[in-house]
Amino acid sequence: MQKPLIAGNWKMNMVINQGVDLVMRLRELIKGIDAVEVVIAPPFTSIHHLSHLVADSPIKLCGQNLFWEKSGAYTGEVSAEMLAAAGCRYVIVGHSERREYFKETDEAVNKKVIAALKGNLKPIICVGETLAEREKGKTLTKVRSQVKKALAGLAGSVVKDITIAYEPIWAIGTGKNATPQEAEEVHNALREHLFEMFGPDAVKDLRIVYGGSVKPDNIDDLMAQPNIDGALVGGASLKADDFARIVKFQHIA
Ligand code: 13P
């Protein structure tokens, strides 16, 4: 099994100097942490600058998005190669905000996942249902379909480099997290689904992390669930103390 993954998605927050301050504080607060993989996803404009600051720390860098082509006339887009050269090891793909505001389809997510892996970036693939879908009992159908389409055409041998982030849309930025039991039910179903798709060897190292209003006061209960392998944190990752406390979650099972 891989280490748990705690990733901070800064979204469109933090100019360079603010990012530097946050990383400096975070470095101190999580010094010596080895049992958890710690990842931050700053805006593109800060990545290269921050790569020097995280070089001798446990923190790894992550892009928030990428385009699937390697280079060319695609104004405003960033390739896997560019992110890797700037210092990223991970990239978030298919976040619900990108699906909603930038109309990213499951097919686009699939192309981005393939491009990320080819470019030596580990994709963190986001899936999740709306409140209306949950209320109609469609949660598992939706997330299974998103995962299946995101991973279409991939060989089982690359699955170990993939992280799935279950982020119920109704829990993002609302302060209303899925209960540990609600999240566990979905994670368990996704793990079974991936097992059916790729077999036992491929999925033994695959991490499924939870995102949506993760905070210092709910991380311990979430991480106590057997199928929750980490967290993708939005708002609370912008505060060094809160993010550090999340990184230092306690197993209370
Ligand atoms: P919040 O933690 O702010 O709810 O955001 C979650 C998220 O979207 C992480 O990608």
Image (cartoon, rainbow, N blue to C red):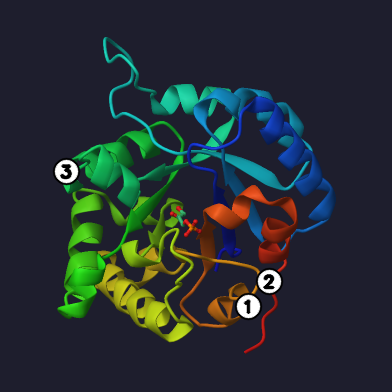
| Structural crowding at the residue carrying mark 1, measured as other residues with C-alpha within 10 Å and reported as few (<14), some (14–19) or many (≥20) | many
Residue 63 to residue 253: above or below:
above
* Point 17% across, 80% down: residue: 137
Looking at the rendered structure, the secondary structure element under dot 3 is: helix
Q: Which residue is mark 2?
A: 249
Residue at the top extreme, as displayed: 73
Q: Which amino acid lies under the numbered mark 1 shown in the image of this protein?
A: Asp
Mark 2 CB lies closer than 8 A to ligand 1: no
**Mark 2 touching mark 3, by CB under 8 A?**
no
Mark pair 2, 3: CA separation:
35 Å
* Point 37% across, 32% down: residue: 66
Comes first in the chain, label 2 or label 3:
3
Circle nearer the viewer, 2 or 3: 2
**Mark 2 touching mark 1, by CB under 8 A?**
yes
Q: Which amino acid lies under the numbered mark 3 shown in the image of this protein?
A: Glu
Q: Which residue is mark 1?
A: 220
Residue 221 to residue 98: above or below:
below
Comes first in the chain, label 1 or label 3:
3
Q: Position of residue 102 (x, y in %)?
A: 25, 37
Circle nearer the viewer, 1 or 3: 1
Q: Which amino acid lies under the numbered mark 2 shown in the image of this protein?
A: Phe
Q: Which residue is mark 3?
A: 107
The foreground one among 185 and 15 is: 15
Looking at the rendered structure, the secondary structure element under dot 2 is: loop
